Amino acid sequence: MRQYSRGHSGIVDRARKLRRDMTDAEKLLWLKLRKAFPNAKFRRQSPVPPYCADFLSYRHRLIIEADGGQHDPGSPVEIARTRFLEEQGFTVLRFWNNDILANIDGVLETIRQAIGGSDHAKRSSPSPRFAPGPSLSRWERERAPKVR
C-alpha cells in the first residue's frame, strides 16, 4: 500500500470514506470516465493535500469536480481551492450533479475537449514504434509489447 508523508493521513482517510460514499452523479461519472477515457487513467477522490479531488488524471493534469447543492463555486472557499489546484498545474472542470445526471454526453464532450481529443482517436493511431517522431525512451522500450 502507498505510504503518505506524515500529516496527510487524515486526508487519505477522508478520501477512502468519500470513495465508499459516492453520490449517484459521481458513480455515473466514474463509470463513464473509465469507459470513455481508458488512457487518461482517472483516479477518484484522490488526495491533493490539503484537498481531495473528485476525479483526477495526472497524465492530463486534469481535475473534475462534481458539485452538489452544498457547493457554491463563487464562495471564497471554492475559489481558493480552485486557485490552489490550478497553481499545482491542474486544469479544474466543475459540473453540477444534475448536469452529470441529465446530460452526461455533454459533460463527456467537455472533458474530451479539455483532454485534447478523444482517447479513441489516440488508440486507433499507429503504435509509437512505427510513428514518425522521436524514438522511444528506455523506459518505454522496456515496457512496450514484444513483437515477433
Image (cartoon, rainbow, N blue to C red):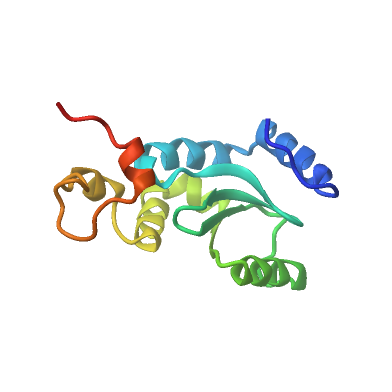
Q: Which quarter of the rendering shows the C terminus?
A: top left
13 to the left or right of 36: right
36 to the left or right of 146: right
Q: Residue at x 29, y 37 (%)?
A: 144
Residue 145 x, y percent position in the rendering: 27, 32
Looking at the image, residue 2 lies above or below residue 6 = above
Residue 127 x, y percent position in the rendering: 19, 44
Q: Quadrant of residue 15?
A: top right
Q: Residue at x 15, y 58 (%)?
A: 132
Q: Which quarter of the rendering shows the N terminus?
A: top right
Which one is nearer the viewer's eye here, 141 or 31?
Answer: 141
Q: Quadrant of residue 96?
A: bottom right
Looking at the image, residue 61 lies above or below residue 120 = below
41 to the left or right of 90: left
Which one is nearer the viewer's eye here, 137 or 74?
Answer: 137
Looking at the image, residue 59 lies above or below residue 84 = above
How many marks the image carries: the answer is 0
110 to the left or right of 131: right
Q: Residue at x 68, y 69 (%)?
A: 84
Q: Residue at x 14, y 47 (%)?
A: 130
Residue 32 x, y percent position in the rendering: 42, 39
Residue 45 x, y percent position in the rendering: 64, 44
Q: Residue furthest top?
A: 148
Q: Residue furthest front?
A: 138
